[in-house]
Amino acid sequence: MTRPHNKVDDVIFASLPWYDLPEVREATDRFWGCLARNLRERGFQQVPERLNRELPYDQQWTSGKLLFSQACGYDVLLAYRNCLRLVVTPTYTVAGCRNGFYNSVLVVRRDARIDHTGELRGVRCVINSPSSHSGMNMLRALFASMQQNGRFFSAVLHSGSHEASLRMVADGFADVASIDRVTYTLIERYRPTALRETRVLCSSMRTPAPPYVTGSHMTDKQVEQIRQAVTETLAMPSMKVAMQALLLDGLANLPLETYRPIGDLERWALGMGYHEIPSAPTVYLPPTGQQQLWHRS
């Protein structure tokens, strides 16, 4: 018996790990609550009542049971390309982050005697994740042309999050970090004292923003239904306050091709022989009888 395309069996995971600061968690939960109702109305079954903040998001992505999440463009294009499908890209009310694009800011200590990027040679760098475009890939591309024998920094540290990277720079455990502009703006709005000991040295080029995603097992029809549900949810008048809290401005239908410059930056940096800042390996989702793996064309 053929299953209806709008029926999702055993899908239990939904998460919004990007920009989920405690200060905006109520707005994030409101967004998911409204979206979950819209998904159920479209025939999706076993839609979680709440976002899953317990299981690490990368384990949710590779579970084969992902309904909805948000991921870095690097994850969708490279590291987790066999596990995720792009749904739609949110846009933000942040300078440099309009129309589905965003950028990073390079942050140093406020009292650091550094005026340009060349003066960072030999300092300690911190990245949030090896699969982060804003915190790793963009930073690596910035320094690739300045490296010598594959190195530029004295050490490359891993923090686990943009918030932790900022704290490490502020507390003197690291000297420079690349921070997602939306994350930086949220912290600037809700936790300005956290930025007191740091300053922005420069901004990166703009690239496509972290998209909303679903699992690779979803059909084209299901992906379109999810996209419609997200569009309808953010258009609801009752979502206005939550969107303002989350700095959300709407949605942009960016095709996967739009994200390819992220991969180009990686290939360029590695082609320059700069391997000091590590890439995340591609994660492959083992195929099953019910899965339809999605590959880049």
Image (tube, helix red, strand yellow):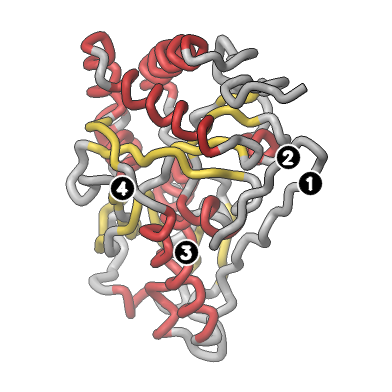
The answer to whether residue 259 is above or below residue 228 is: below
- For image coordinates 31% across by 74% down, the residue present is 117
Amino acid residing under circle 4: Arg
SS category of the residue bearing label 4: helix
The numbered mark, 1 or 3, whose residue comes first in the sequence reads 3
Instruction: Please report contact status of discs 1 and 2: CB closer than 8 Å, yes or no.
Output: yes
Spatial separation of the CA atoms under disc 3 and disc 4: 14 Å
The numbered mark, 3 or 4, whose residue comes first in the sequence reads 3
- For image coordinates 58% across by 44% down, the residue present is 84
Q: Give left or right: position of 217 versus 19.
A: right
Along the viewing direction, whichever of 129 and 289 lies nearer the viewer: 289
- For image coordinates 60% across by 67% down, the residue present is 278
The numbered mark, 4 or 1, whose residue comes first in the sequence reads 4
Amino acid residing under circle 3: Asn
SS category of the residue bearing label 3: helix
Foreground mark, 4 or 1, reads 1
SS category of the residue bearing label 2: loop
Q: How crowded is mark 3: few (under 14 residues within 10 Å), some or many (20 or more)?
A: many
Q: Which mark is residue 287?
A: 1
Q: Quadrant of the N terminus?
A: top right
Q: Which mark is residue 122?
A: none
Spatial separation of the CA atoms under disc 1 and disc 3: 29 Å
Q: Name the residue under label 2.
A: 291
Q: Which mark is residue 137?
A: 3
Residue 193 in view (yes/no) = no
Foreground mark, 2 or 3, reads 2
Q: How crowded is mark 1: few (under 14 residues within 10 Å), some or many (20 or more)?
A: few
- For image coordinates 49% across by 71% down, the residue present is 266
The numbered mark, 4 or 2, whose residue comes first in the sequence reads 4
Q: Mark 4 points at which residue?
A: 181
